[in-house]
Image: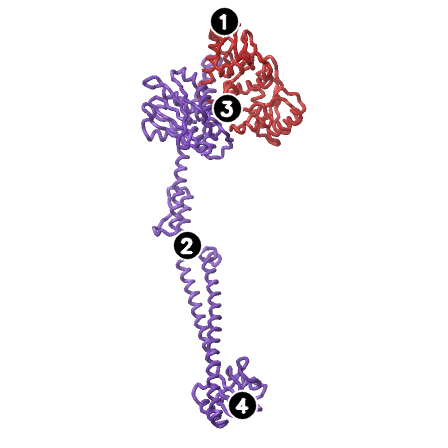
Chain colours: A red, B purple
Amino acid sequence: MKNAPVAHEEIAYSDRMKILVIEDDREAADYLQKALTEAGHTAHVAGDGETGFALADSGDYDVMIVDRMLPRRDGLSVIAGLRSRGNTTPVLILSALGEVDDRVTGLRAGGDDYLTKPYAFSELLARVEVLNRRASFKEADTVYRIGDLELDRLSHTVRRGGREISLQPREFKLLEYLMRHAGQVVTRTMLLENVWDYHFDPQTNVIDVHVSRLRGKIEKGFDSPILHTVRGAGYMLKAT
Amino acid sequence: MALPAIMKTTAARLSAMYLLLFAACAVLLVFYMTSLSVRMLTAQTQQTINEEVQGLGRAYQRGGLPLLVRTVERRARQPGANLYLIADANGRILSGNVESLEFGVLETDGWTERPFAYQRFGETNRERRQIASPEQDDVARSTHDAIALVLRLPNRMILLVGRDLGEPERFRVVVRRALMVALGMMGLGGLLIWYFVGRYALKRIDNVSEASRRIMGGDLSGRLPVTGAGDEFDRLSENLNTMLAKIGNLNEGLKQVSDNIAHDLKTPLTRLRNRAEAALAGKPETVEYREALEGTIAESDQLIRTFNAILMISRLEAGYSAESVSKVDLADAVRDVVELYEPAAEEVGVGLEAKVAGEFVVEGNRELIGQALSNIVDNAIKYSAGATEKPVVRVALEKKAGEVRLTVTDNGQGIPDDADRQRATERFVRLEHSRTQPGSGLGLSLAKAVMTFHGGRLDLLPVDPGLSVIMSFPERGA
C-alpha cells in the first residue's frame, strides 16, 4: 500500500517548545527564530556566551541550540557550566567543525546532539523535536507498541495485528529506533547515526532503500500505512 | 661599499678573523724565534770566551804576567777581536782594548750577570775617563753591550774576557724585521686574496639573490644559476632548484584544483541561481514553483557535500586532522558497509558479495575507513551496472606482505587506460565515461586521503573485466 509523502509543516506537533538559541550570527539567529516560531515553538535568542548562560540559567527551556564558537564565552564552556549547576536541558550543538573528534568533544562537554553547519532546517527541527521528547518509550521498556505494531526487544520479534513479521537484525534495529521516536520526524542522517553508527553522508539513497524494504515488510498485506515519508525531511512512524 | 657594509659579508668577517689569528701566531713565532736564536748565540759566545780564557791561562802559566799582557795586546789588536782587559786590584785599566766600562762589572768574579755597557779603546772621544765613574750619561752615547768573564789573577789583578753583543742584537733586529716584512706581506696577500675570492663568492651569492628575487617576483619558472663547478654553491643552487620545481608542481596542482573548484562549484552554483531565477519568474503556488525550490535545496545539499569532501581531503592530506585512532576490525567495517549498501545495490540489479572470515584488526579510525570504503563500494556499484554479464561487486579481505588488503572488485567496464587509472584518484577528476554519472569526482580522492592518513595506500588494478580497488593498511605490530 503506497502512501503519499507528508510535508513536514503539515504535521501537527502536540507540544510547543520553549527554545533558547545561543548564536552570534545575527542573520542565522533571526532565521532560526522565525523558522522555529513558524513550526509552532517559542524561541529566544542570545547573541553571546555570557548572555546565553544567564538566560539558560534563569529561564526554563525545553531545548537549547548552542553554537560552538561564541563571543565572550565558548559554547562548550556554557554547556559545561550549565551541567555543573545541575541544568539538564537537552542541548543541540551547532558547529562549523565537522570532524568526528569535534563531535566527540562536543558530546563529552554535555551536549546531547551535534549538527554541523551548514544544515537543513528540517534536520535541525527533527533533532530538536527528538531531543525534547527524547523517546516514546523508556529504556527499560521491553515491548514497544504503536497501533497494531508490536516489537519485543527481548525475544527480537515483531508482530503486526498479531501476525509475526520476520526482520533482518539491522531492520529490527531500524524499526526499534523508528518506534522509539514514533510520532517524530526522523531524518536519514539520524538513522545512519543511530542505527549504523556512521556520521558521514552516504552519497546515494542507501537509507531510503533500507526504509522502503522495512516498509514493505511491515505494511504489505495490511490496510493502513504506518511508516510515513516526510517530504524534504525524513520518515515518521505513526499509527493512523 | 662602505666598511660596515663590507663587514656585513660573511667572507669579510671570516677573513678578518683568520687574519687576526694568523697575526697572533706570527707575533708569537717572532718572539720565540728571536729569543731562541739569541740564547743559542749567547751560549756560543760563552764557549768562545771559555776557550780564550783557557788559552790566556796557559800563556800566564808559561810566561807569567808579561806573556799574558803580550798575548792580550796581540789578540786585542786583531780585527773583530773580543774584549780584553787587564786591570789592577783597584780596577785601573792596564791593558786591553776596553777604554771604559760600566761601574761595578769588575767587582764580581765569573760571568757578568747581565749585559753591560762598555766603550772600546780609541773608538770615540779621546777624553780619558775615570773607569769607576758613576756618571755615564755621555758614555752611554757610544757604548755597546757585552757579556764577559771576569777572573782574578793570583796577584789580585783582574782579567776580563768578553764579547760584544752587537752581533746577536743585530741578528735579532734582522730576524724581527724579516718577520715583520713577512707579516706585512701576508696581511697584504690576505687582503688581496680576500678581495678577489670574496668578490667572486659575493658575486655568485649576489647572482643567487638576484635570481631568487626574480622568482619571488612571480617568475616561478626561473631557476638559480648553476656554474657546473660542482662546488657547494652549485649544490645549494641545485637543491634550491629542486625545491623550486617541487613548489612549481604544487602550485600547478593548486591551480588545477582551483580551476576544478571553479568549474565544479560554479556549475552547480549557476544552476542554482538559474533555477531560483526561473522560479521567481514563474507563478508561485504551482507545482513547478515548488519543484524549483526543492531542486534548489537538493543542489545546495550537493554543493555542501562537495565542499565538506574538499575540506576533509585537504585536512587529511595536510596531516593535521585530529581524528583519533583505535583498533578497528576491518571485517566489521566490511560487514557494516556491505550491509548498508546491499539493498541499494540490489535495487539497481548489482550483486554485492563479501568474503570475510576471521579478524583483520588495524590501527585506524572506524568512521574514516567506513566513509572511504562506502565511497569505493558506491563507485563499484555505479560502474558495474553496465557490465556485460550479471553485474557483481565483491569485497574481500586478506593479509599479505605485512599488510591488510581490502579489495573491492567490480566486473564493469573498468578503467583500461593506465594514465586514466592514475588520474582517477586525483581531485575532481571524472573520467569521460563517468561524466554522465552523478557524483563530485571526490570519492576516490577522499578514499586515497583516508589511506594516506592511515599510512597505507590506495591502488587501482585492472581486472578482466572490471576494476579492483585495493586499500592496503599496514598490519598492526608489523
Judged left or right of residue B84, residue B245 is left
User: Residue A32 at x, y = what percent?
Assistant: 57, 21
In this rendering, which labeled residue sits more in front, label 3 or label 4? 4
Tell me, yes or no, whether dots 2 and 4 are on the same chain.
Answer: yes
| Image quadrant in which you'd find residue B337 | top left
Q: Residues within 10 Å of mark 1 (few under 14, many from 20)?
A: few
Q: Chain of mark 3?
A: A
Kindly check if marks 1 and 4 are in contact, taking CB atoms under 8 A apart as contact: no
Tell me, yes or no, whether dots 1 and 3 are on the same chain.
Answer: yes
In this rendering, which labeled residue sits more in front, label 3 or label 2? 3
CA gap, disc 2 and disc 4: 77 Å
In this rendering, which labeled residue sits more in front, label 1 or label 2? 1
User: Foreground: B271 or B199?
Assistant: B199
Q: Residues within 10 Å of mark 3 (few under 14, many from 20)?
A: many
Furthest residue in direction top, as rendered: A223
Tell me the residue at 54%/24% (across/down): A115
Tell me, yes or no, whether dots 1 and 4 are on the same chain.
Answer: no
Kindly check if marks 1 and 3 are in contact, taking CB atoms under 8 A apart as contact: no
Q: In the rendered structure, which amino acid carries the disc numbered 2? A: Leu
Res. B254 mark? none
Residue beneath disc 1? A223
Residue beneath disc 3? A199
Quadrant assignment for the C terminus of chain B: top left
User: Residue B62 at x, y = what percent?
Assistant: 47, 93
Kind of element beneath mark 4: loop
